[in-house]
Image (cartoon, coloured by chain):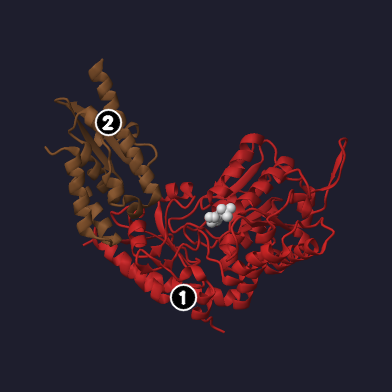
Chain colours: A brown, B red
Amino acid sequence: MSNIQDIQNEIIEEFEILGDDKESTIFYIMELGNNLPDFPENDRIDDNIIKGCQSKVWLTAKMENEKIHFFADSNTDITKGLISLLIRVLSERSPKEIIDAELKFIDKIGMGNIIGSQRSNGLASMIKQMKLYALAYQAKQNA
Amino acid sequence: MPINIEEIRNLFPVLHQEVNGKPLVYFDNAATTQKPKQVLDALVQYYELDNSNIHRGAHTLADRATRYYENTRSAIQKFINAKEEEEIIFTKGTTESINLVASTFGRKFISKGDEIIISTLEHHSNIVPWQMLCEEKGAILKIIPISEEGEIDLEAFENLLSEKTKFVSIVHVSNALGTINPVKQIIKSAHKVGARVLLDGAQSTSHLEVDVQDLDCDFLAFSAHKLYGPTGLGILYGKREVLESMPPYQGGGEMIKEVSFEKTTYNEIPFKFEAGTPNIADVIAFAKAIEFIQQLGKKEIKEHEDELLSYATDGLNSIKGFIPVGTAKEKVSVISFNINEMHPFDVGMMLDANGIAVRTGHHCTQPLMHRLGLEGTVRASFSVYNTKSEIDRLVAAVSKIAKIKNK
Ligand SMILES: Cc1ncc(COP(=O)(O)O)c(C=O)c1O
């Protein structure tokens, strides 16, 4: 599997091909959401909701073979697309990789301009929650 | 005389720009309207030529500023046909106007077991102040139900009224759905049981003729920024005898007659309720907004807006997957809607990508959304400077967006 850096570069290239047109970029992000695997109905509970997002976002994680797998869902399609990007970069990685990850693709593709400030704050909350999961699993590993 | 849209549009500098590579279409007028050049000029002119504190200075500038400030009060008096200028109080918005009444009228006249009636259509600013008051006083908040179409159930309202009813606070026009409420009848019925009535006129004053003497409301609250005026300025109208019976809101300068450490006496209305240096510049500039409306004519504005409303309703209704929210018979130029299988946030963002500004979400009416079983809606609201060709762009964009999930 490629490293975090390579995947980020891939995403940056994909968005470069889309160009400046905001509408096509948003359509593209919405389509990405379709790639998210089905989220288990019984995980769709308030405990799994990320605080700080305007739309509803559910996130869970589990550890398998030393790697963290993330599962997520949202009630809005654009947010689903955004999560799918984060999962593509951060899922199935070791806690340390996730904690150390610098997500430069978000600025590089000008995500703030595309999704606006409220959703950008939501995106930051999602990243924070993913890193918190990684910290928790790392603490467990070290214990 | 029908209004000349091109001439009107030229008065609004903000309309002439591109957003996301497309000419801006501003359909978020229920949140705040844009400001005509006269209002902007008046703000600059005040700071460039007249700036000084009012009601106290012994110099020419202070005198001039005071005169302009009080001229606006008199313009508002005429605008809503109040009996006297003194019945017009400046606040910082509809929200503060309602809070003022809830805390002062409430402090003196509401006690344990009394009932206050509001409706399901209310904006949070006409819910929370009353909840706070009820909690403090042990009073009871009663809610008028609505129909699926978003109309108040008048019969249910009549049944809620009793000698326990002390206050009715009701929105004149719903910001979320555009419903025009039958407030004249509500006021009449409330008065029969001796209750006072506040009208939340935040949305009605820009679209309808509002005549406080004809309506016979005890209070009317509204915001300048929804009426082509500046932000941070609100109006509270109250009948003289009611205002005089109420204790002051905030203590400070301007609201006093005489202060000693032993005893302070309060100023007369309206100054009793205007503590501190007020929002002088915005008050002065607001007169220009009222002038703008009166020159066009409320009737002419409404005719134009109604035409836009029916044109947009027809266009949008033909789109597969379009779900109108709020279909009251009497409505102002507001269209709330959803797209089948799509979240309002996503629809709003895609409209923005097309240069079209709308509002999405619960519109500060969460209990209403809950009643309708919705998380939120997309709301397009039209104003005097909007055009049919802008609506064509909305209809085209909504069509395209709806197709994603409604093939
Ligand atoms: C019906 C209604 N009431 C009250 C308000 C609050 O007005 P303001 O925020 O100007 O105080 C609004 C504004 O959105 C409104 O639409």
Of discs 2 and 1, which sits in the foreground? Answer: 2
In the rendered view, tell whether residue B188 sits above or below residue B308: above
Beta carbon of the mark 2 residue lies under 8 A of ligand 1: no
Q: Quadrant of ligand 1?
A: bottom right
Q: Secondary structure at mark 1?
A: helix
Instruction: Tell me the chain of label 2.
Output: A
Instruction: Tell me the chain of label 1.
Output: B
Quadrant where the C terminus of chain B is found in the figure: bottom left
Residue in the foreground of this view, choosing between A104 and B392: A104
- Picture disc at residue A99: 2
User: Residue A104 sits in which quadrant?
Assistant: top left
Q: Amino acid at mark 2?
A: Ile
- Picture disc at residue A114: none
Q: Position of residue B194 (x, y in %)?
A: 71, 51
Tell me if residue B118 can be seen.
yes
Tell me: B231 left or right of B338: right
Quadrant where the N terminus of chain B is found in the figure: bottom right
**Which residue does the image show at 52% across and 56% down from the upper left?**
B152
**Which residue does the image show at 81% across and 64% down from the upper left?**
B60
- Alpha carbons under labels 2 and 1: distance apart: 57 Å
Tell me: B264 left or right of A25: right
Q: Secondary structure at mark 2?
A: helix
Q: Which residue is mark 1?
A: B307
| Residue at the outermost bottom position | B1
Tell me if residue A56 can be seen.
no
Q: Position of residue A124 (x, y in %)?
A: 35, 41
Mark 2 Cα shell of 10 Å, populated few (<14), some (14-19), many (≥20): some
